[in-house]
Image: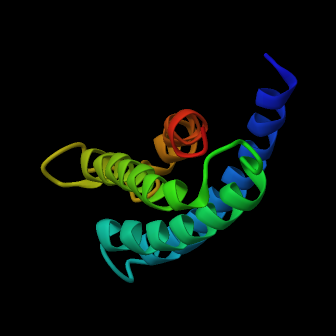
Amino acid sequence: MESGLLGQLIRFVIAGGITTGLYTLVYSPLAGLGITSEQVANICGYLVAMTSGYLLHSKWSFRGHGAEASKTSWRFFTVSLVSFGLNTMFVWILTDDAMLAGPWWWPLVPILFVTPLVTFALNRFWVFG
């Protein structure tokens, strides 16, 4: 792995950890305490994560990677929609009564381990590439 890619990966993991942590801090009390449905909690967490993620990744994780700012905004938003779609699918499959009907926290497992891998690849090669 080249040092540029390794550095980006390390920065992405740190920034992504912060972003995912913020998502979890919003989603968990809303869904876990039954304040709202898991899907509404997912939307709220997504909005916080998307905003913080763009700032962290554009200013730090992928800084100087070469893409011009006019391209990164709409591409980042598109990748964020992919991320939101994945997370929504995980929430739906794992918590919906018509599917697995698991507890509110089940979707956090793939949200923490699958979604970040997909978004790293898309951000690295398409958004900031």
The one of 26 and 11 positioned closer to us in this rendering: 11
- For the point 50% across and 50% down, the residue is 108
The one of 38 and 46 positioned closer to us in this rendering: 46
The quarter of the image holding the N terminus is top right
- Colour style of the rendered protein structure: rainbow
Residue farthest top in this picture = 1
The one of 35 and 85 positioned closer to us in this rendering: 85
Residue farthest bottom in this picture = 35
Residue farthest left in this picture = 98
Q: Residue 25: where, in percent of width, then height?
A: 60, 70
Give the answer, above or below, for where 9 lies relative to 11.
Answer: above
The image shows a total of numbered marks equal to: 0
Question: In this rendering, would 51 be left or right of 16?
Answer: left
The quadrant where residue 21 appears: bottom right
Question: In this rendering, would 52 be left or right of 93?
Answer: right
Q: Residue 47: where, in percent of width, then height?
A: 46, 72
Question: In this rendering, would 44 be left or right of 93?
Answer: right
- For the point 61% across and 53% down, the residue is 68
Q: Residue 7: where, in percent of width, then height?
A: 84, 35
Give the answer, above or below, for where 7 lies relative to 86.
Answer: above
- For the point 55% across and 65% down, the residue is 49
The quarter of the image holding the C terminus is top right
Q: Residue 43: where, in percent of width, then height?
A: 37, 70
